[in-house]
Image (cartoon, grey):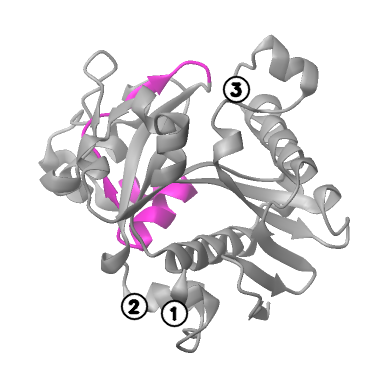
Amino acid sequence: MAVEHLASGKPVDVRAGDFELRLAETQDEIAAAQALRYRVFYEEMSATPTPAMAAARRDFDSFDPYCDHLLVIDRRRGAGASGVVGTYRLMRRAAAASHGRFYSVDEFDIAPLVAYPGEILELGRSCIGREHRTASAMQLLWRGIADYVRYYDVGVMFGCASFPGTDPKRWAMPLSYLYHHHLAPPELRPRALADRYVDMRLLPPESIDKRMALVALPPLIKGYLRVGGFIGDGAVVDKQFGTVDVCIVVVSERVTARYVRHYTGPQPPAGTARDGA
């Protein structure tokens, strides 16, 4: 699929065939992203909605008004809200300060990340509609994140990623693999809150089959690892969403040049709005 990065001065503005990738620009588009999240998290998966969410058939919380909402739009369905088929929620430092906190603090101590001197970005609420759930759709979202990171000069990205179900022992092999082979450096290592901490060291290093562990990892976590992502210390059981969560950390400058080229394409010429943001 040919991908065109438009020189519009926006943080994200990409066309790929019938698909458009950009940030939500209206409340209707944000509502469409919330409706997509509801279908994926509450109808396809095992999350438990609040009564208000169930009545509205949307996944929403107090963070949404402070976040940017990255959208994949299938223009065959419509040019705006009616075409939303994929989304990712993005929250930078200033937005978290305005809200009062990052979403991840309910599960993890992210003090080392907040102490980072540059821009930081929390990633969350990633989903793609069932009929569009392909590798190319996920790559489009990654392209959007890469453009966004470059536009705002983000140094560190982080967020929760999940294993389905609420039994950590079911995921003993991949959790142990992540701890022993992809633990974040101490200066950037989030840790599960003490009252929610689940030790990921469920198996000793010598009993881990790396190939089997990698096969068992959810696709999103594999994607983070491919770009050089790390894992925080400890997992958390999220009973509302029916998942076992880990905290992902990606340092922008450590993302390999191959993936930078793959997801962002050619660098824009000096002096464009993207460079000056």
Residue drawn 70% across and 10% down?
51
Residue 73 percent across, percent down from the top left: 75, 57
Q: Residue furthest bottom?
A: 269
Q: Residues within 10 Å of mark 3 (few under 14, many from 20)?
A: some
Residue 193 percent across, percent down from the top left: 25, 21
Q: Which residue is mark 1?
A: 261
The quadrant where residue 2 appears: bottom right
**Sequence-first tag of 1 and 3:** 3
Left or right of residue 60, residue 100 in this image: left
Q: Which residue is mark 3?
A: 46
Real-space Cα separation, disc 3 to disc 2, in angstroms: 38 Å
Three-letter code, disc 1: Arg
Residue drawn 32% across and 23% down?
169
The quadrant where residue 101 appears: top left
The quadrant where residue 18 appears: bottom right
Magenta stretch? 212-240
Residue 99 percent across, percent down from the top left: 47, 31
Q: Nearer the viewer, residue 88 or 7?
A: 7
